[in-house]
Image (spheres, helix red, strand yellow):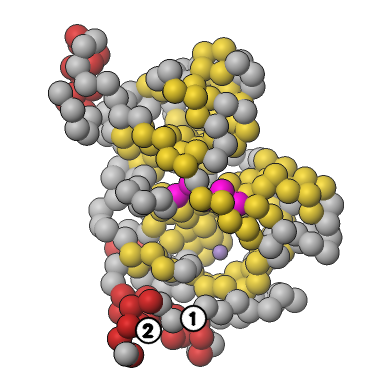
């Protein structure tokens, strides 16, 4: 047998131990730079656009930052997504067009919902030292993606003690512990502090999942996964048994496979080129759709989408 593992296949594995092994695809991240900080883009990758509603994952750092030189992303627009920011070291100052001004530190969550349009900046907070974390996007479903923008900061998130690991429930639910963060689709985001040895994490078999290792190495199904890689785990698993030789930190993302094919260009998540064109014209014209960010950094612009350039020829 070959091909994707369905929940029915997974039941066969459980019952007989001889059926199709569960999906494991290790994808290499693409290296880029945001301000003074190296980023490893784990999602989207060719052949893997979404995992549940998760559609973007940038592992930022580790980098050494100063009050003058940090991540320094000037005001820029978003539509149709939530930004999920999580740090393992350092600080970032978030400002947005709703008037939010929020420093984020390790163990905290910044969650911004773009809906029909929001703009924000990510700035040096005055902090000096190591900066590391992950920024993720969650595609919004049809029901909320044309709605109002919003911002939440959560300084206190539930933790679950597992065999061999502690999980922080950033978004969604694990073993009865539910994050207070807004959730527009059925998805989960966990930060796993895995101790040396073998751990066990319950999974929902109807979700697809992936693992992004932030620190150390984690072995899954006999394959070592390291920072700079995303391990796509498919659907149909009800347990993950990561093994490590030393303590490691990883982000486990999952959710029901997303309802639509998403179209992503620059900072926009939509469904059609027309709606992304309209958003981008509004941003470039500064017509008020994306509000204003009280930031000392310059507003970021981008040239027209590639399909728009082709239309003009
Ligand atoms: Mn952004």
Identify the residue at image location x=57%, y=26%.
217
Q: Which residues are magenta?
A: 39-43
For the stretch drawn in magenta, the main secondary structure is: strand
Q: Which mark is residue 303?
A: 1
**Residue 207, position as x, y percentages in the image:** 31, 36
- Tell me if the residue at label 2 has its CB under 8 Å from ligand 1: no
- Report the residue at 57% width, 12% height from top: 197
Q: Is residue 294 above or below residue 286?
A: above
- In percent of width and height, residue 200 lies at 46, 17
Give the quarter the ligand 1 occupies.
bottom right
Percent x, y for residue 189?
A: 47, 40
Quadrant of residue 141 in the image? bottom left
Quadrant for residue 158, please give it. top right
In front here: 246 or 294?
246
Horizontally, residue 257 falls left or right of residue 251, namely: left
Label 1: few (<14), some (14–19) or many (≥20) C-alpha neighbours in 10 Å = few
Number of numbered discs overlaid on the protein picture: 2
**Quadrant assignment for the N terminus:** top left
Q: Are marks 2 and 1 in contact (CB under 8 Å)?
A: yes
Magenta stretch: includes residue 233: no
Q: Residue at x 28, y 72 (%)?
A: 272
In front of the other: 214 or 90: 214
In the displayed structure, does residue 269 sit left or right of residue 288? Answer: left
Mark 2 Cα-neighbour bin, 10 Å: few <14, some 14–19, many ≥20: few
Instruction: Identify the residue at image location x=40%, y=77%.
Output: 305
Position of 40 compared to 255: left or right?
right
Q: Is residue 236 visible?
A: yes
Image disc number at residue 309? 2
The answer to whether residue 191 shows anywhere in this view is no
**Mark sitting earlier along the chain (2/1):** 1
* Outermost residue toward the front in this view: 313
Residue 106: horizontal and vertical position, in percent?
A: 69, 43
């Amino acid at each position: 047998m070959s091909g994707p593992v369905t929940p029915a296949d997974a039941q066969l594995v459980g019952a007989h131990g001889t059926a199709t092994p569960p999906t494991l695809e290790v994808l290499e991240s693409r290296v880029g730079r945001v301000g003074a900080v190296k980023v490893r883009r784990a999602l989207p990758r060719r052949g893997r656009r979404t995992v549940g509603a998760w559609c973007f994952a940038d592992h930022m750092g580790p980098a050494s930052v100063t009050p003058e030189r940090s991540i320094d992303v000037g005001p820029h627009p978003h539509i149709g997504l939530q930004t999920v920011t999580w740090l393992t070291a350092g600080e970032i100052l978030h400002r947005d067009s709703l008037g939010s001004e929020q420093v984020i530190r390790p163990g905290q969550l910044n969650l911004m919902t773009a809906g029909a349009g929001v703009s924000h900046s990510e700035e040096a907070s005055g902090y000096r030292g190591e900066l590391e974390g992950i920024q993720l996007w969650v595609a919004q479903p049809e029901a909320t993606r044309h709605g109002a923008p919003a911002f939440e900061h959560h300084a206190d998130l539930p933790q679950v003690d597992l065999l061999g690991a502690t999980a922080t429930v950033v978004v969604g639910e694990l073993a009865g512990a539910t994050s207070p963060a807004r959730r527009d689709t059925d998805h989960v985001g966990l930060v796993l502090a895995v101790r040396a040895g073998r751990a066990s994490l319950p999974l929902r078999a109807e979700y697809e999942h992936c693992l992004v290792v932030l620190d150390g190495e984690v072995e899954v199904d006999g394959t070592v996964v390291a920072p700079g890689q995303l391990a796509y785990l498919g659907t149909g698993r009800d347990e993950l048994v990561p093994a490590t030789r030393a303590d490691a930190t990883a982000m486990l993302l999952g959710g029901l496979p997303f309802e639509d094919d998403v179209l992503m260009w620059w900072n926009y998540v939509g469904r059609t080129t027309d709606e992304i064109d309209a958003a981008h014209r509004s941003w470039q014209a500064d017509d008020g759709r994306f509000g204003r960010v009280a930031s000392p950094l310059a507003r970021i612009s981008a040239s027209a989408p590639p399909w728009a350039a082709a239309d003009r020829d």
